[in-house]
Image (cartoon, grey):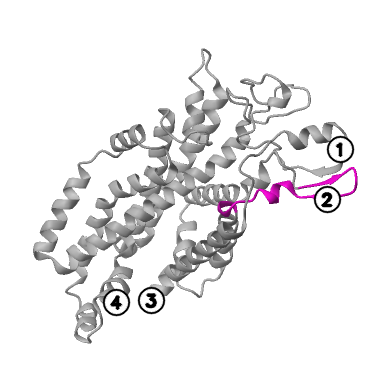
Amino acid sequence: MKGDVTQNTLLGRIAGMGGAVRFALVWLGLLATVAAWAPLLANSLPLWVERADGRWAFPLFAQFTAEDVAWWVGWWSAVVLLRWRRIPAARRLGIALGVVGVAWGIGSAYLKPAPLVVYDAWRQAERAGELRSALWAPIPYSPKDYLRDFGVTALEPPLAAIPERWHWLGTDDQGGDVASRMIHASRIALSIGFIATGVALVIGVTIGAAMGYFAGWIDLIGMRLVEIFEAVPTLFLLLTFVAFFERSLPLMMVIIGLTAWPGYARYTRAEFLRLRGIEFVQGAIASGLPLRSVLFRHMLPNAVAPLAVAAAFGVASAILAEATLSFLGLGLVDEPSWGQMLNQAVKSAAFNWWLALFPGGAILMTVLAYNLLGEALRDALDPRLERNGR
């Protein structure tokens, strides 16, 4: 019961720690909202159109993918479950992940978007008078729309006076709208941070729990394995893999997760070594509960504090690793990325300040927000600070 109360009041305690922490929560919430609703915020396809002959069409929704549905359902699940505080936090997280998985599966089975999209088709139809009316996104440009129907497009600063179009944050060297690419790139930043950290947590907690509970030769072998993986430089391993294999987001997530788990294993091992001799664990063993229940139902919830803090810092590190790789020109091909846009700021002869300020600022604020959240979690979950009256 005490654990449930602690979980349910944790967000309130974190939010009351100061303006910096509130800024972190607001920024991350805004970033998640922008990522979830990206297709509706920035898209070259109108939400709906009425043709000259009276027929209606919904071009944007016809191109919805399973990823779009998963992001949208995940956002609504988070909103609902954050307010449903009677359910323990760990169970709410499991429910949200299950709902997102089901939504992604249904979307993959039933949504069949066209493999090739002509982004300027509806703009040209509107200019030709073939549409009676149309509802466009607030930023009417997709991240891969390079505005070829406007002729030769190149680097344009923010709010440049260009006939027939308006770019709040300017364009990149291919003519793509920076604001649209920034919005859609937030999906890559958040997904690589959460999934890579999730992979590392699963591996680290499993190995660390075995080391801490069994000790002995299992602990000895496990620690040697931890030391081997800690010696592997993540960035150089990423550079090696993208040089020999296809550049893909899942590959980056897996590599970052496989190299980040030793830290979580060390934290879990230390907590399980402390807990294995406590009365409630010995009572669970004496009552004949299965090993899985002893480890993950009774011991792990009491060892979650250092893992939560490390996970917040781990998400920031994963986002920074992907941005670094994209800045070096070895990131995803033809996909919007903050690091890729930052690279374009220095590629041409002149320094393009808007391609440095906006993506660089987004990277800085996101990494800073996760670091502030990690420090807040550490302060909220550290019992020594509670005893000192903080």
Q: Earlier in the sequence, mark 1 or mark 2?
A: 2
Q: Is residue 14 above or below residue 337?
A: below
| Magenta residues (range) | 48-68
The residue at 90%/45% (across/down) is: 53
- What separation in Å lies between label 2 and label 4 (alpha carbons)? 56 Å
204 in magenta: no
Which quadrant of the figure contains the C terminus?
bottom left
Residue behind mark 1 = 130
- What separation in Å lies between label 4 and label 3 (alpha carbons)? 19 Å
Q: Is residue 180 above or below residue 219?
A: above
Say which amino acid is labelled 2.
Answer: Trp
Count of numbered tags:
4
Residue behind mark 3 = 2
Residue behind mark 4 = 293
Say which amino acid is labelled 4.
Answer: Ser
Q: Nearer the viewer, mark 2 or mark 4?
A: 2
SS at mark 1?
A: loop
Q: Contact (CB < 8 A) between labels 1 and 2?
A: no
Q: Earlier in the sequence, mark 2 or mark 4?
A: 2
Residue 234 screen position, x and y as percent? 29, 40
Residue behind mark 2 = 56
SS at mark 3?
A: helix
Say which amino acid is labelled 3.
Answer: Lys
Q: Earlier in the sequence, mark 4 or mark 3?
A: 3
Farthest residue to the bottom: give it.
Answer: 287
